[in-house]
Image: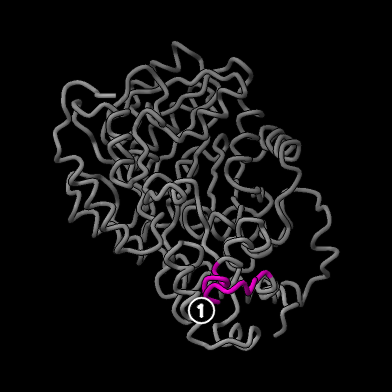
Amino acid sequence: MSLEHPSARWLKRLVRDGRPIYLGIVAALDAAVREGELQPGDQLPPQRTVAGLLGVDFTTVTRAYAAARRRGLVEAAVGRGTFVRARAADDEAGLIDLSMNLPPPPDGISLAACLKETVAAILDRTDAATLMAYHPGAGTLGQKAAGAAWLAPCLGDIAPERVLVCPGAQSALAALLAALVPRGGGLVVDPLTYPGIKALAAALGLRLLPCAIDGEGVLPDALERLCRQERPAAIYLIPTLQNPMAFTLGVERRRAVAELARAHDLQIIEDDPYSRLLDAPPPALASFAPERAFHLATLSKTLSPGLRTAFLACPPGPAADRVQQSLRALALMPAPLMAAVAASWIREGVADRLLAGVRREARARRAVAAGLLPAARGAPEGVHLWLPLPEAWPPERLHRAAQDRGLSLVTAEAFATGETWPGGVRISLGGPAKRAVLAQALSAVAALLNDAPTARLVV
């Protein structure tokens, strides 16, 4: 390796100005990160290689890398090397992130190694110019077949032609709402739901119609009254490990929702990012009304957000054609390389191995949470849980108190779709890179909730 190698060019920034060389190396690394020469996830050369390139002692480089880790510039992974650390806004503020729903790092398998191997194999067998060109349609037939296989444990066997490969769930939801709900039309939702659907409804001029729920989910009687009074065009549900409240709609309740949708000509949008985390997922809501249900499953919550790949199973007919046209207008196509990686992982069993690793880590983290926050609700394999809050904790007060303790939390108001909603906080378990950091954060949450707030908010 020379100083011209892409991973080593930043070393040319080293200025030998009389200060300790290890500090000069850290300064060069910091400048390269700040100016974008090095990106989050970039791997640094091994320490012995750096020592040889700069003509310095190995211990000097070891000291520099250690100082860079303390500053939060890099992170080391045993057996893999040293990498530029990703720094989110909360991380910059020194907060432990419990607000973003992410799958935890898979236990016992390297996501980075899988990605390197698969990308190399794809480039070996595929013409790069063809791969990186525009591709008509929502995925190739092979990618659609891989999507159908990924959906099968929840949805059953479906024809690959019914599957659209989408560049993430948000673009798919935008296409669905644009195609299925007219401006000013009504969309039935839970009282607390995914914030992304709130943003889309506001952008598209849709009316959100919160439906009453119990501990299992939407109440059929309340849904029927809402359909008769408001005549909504569609219903949007996250029936399995609901976001944010973590409940799961039972089979009989799913059947009742499907029958009501059929009776009131209601299109069903089933957002299903979490079912594959379960060893035995319930049958998809879409399987009870296949002629009117759109079933969406993203890989962002089960494998990695960076894949930017989701699979949308559509019913046959004109509604599906409108959704496909809407998706193309909004996003044109999925990213060919990431779609190819996702399809390869599913076909070759890598996705199942990664999923198994995520499940193991999710169970371990959920067990930690159960010990520290016994009042929280969530599945053993879930990546988030719901913690009800007493009325004495105003959301603004809780958010500020959490920040004072180094925590980033998201409270119920971020998910609210109506004027009243149950108070609580969603705790995401996958954000912290290490289980020990998660345990530290959850202990801080428990301590925070044990402190009774004063009646007045002091500002």
Amino acid type, label 1: Arg
Instruction: Out of 295 and 210, give the one closest to the viewer.
Output: 210
Q: Which residue is mark 1?
A: 80
Quarter holding the C terminus?
top left
225 left or right, relative to 271: left
* Magenta stretch contains residue 132: no
Measured as percent of width and height from the top left, residue 334 is found at: 70, 51
Name above or below for residue 176 compared with residue 156. Answer: above
The answer to which quarter of the image holds residue 258 is: top left
- Residue 366, x across and y down, in percent: 28, 57
Instruction: Tell me where the magenta segment starts and ends, as one range.
Output: 13-26
- Establish if 103 lies above or below 332: below
Name the one closer to the observer, 246 or 108: 108
**Residue located at (28% from left, 45% from top):** 405
The question of residue 22 being in magenta is answered with yes
x and y percentages locating residue 389 in the rendered image: 22, 33
Quarter the N terminus occupies? bottom right
Which residue is at 63% across, 18% downward?
Answer: 183
What colour-coding does the image apply? one colour
- Crowding at mark 1 (Cα within 10 Å: few <14, some 14-19, many 20+): few
Q: Position of residue 278 (x, y in %)?
A: 37, 57
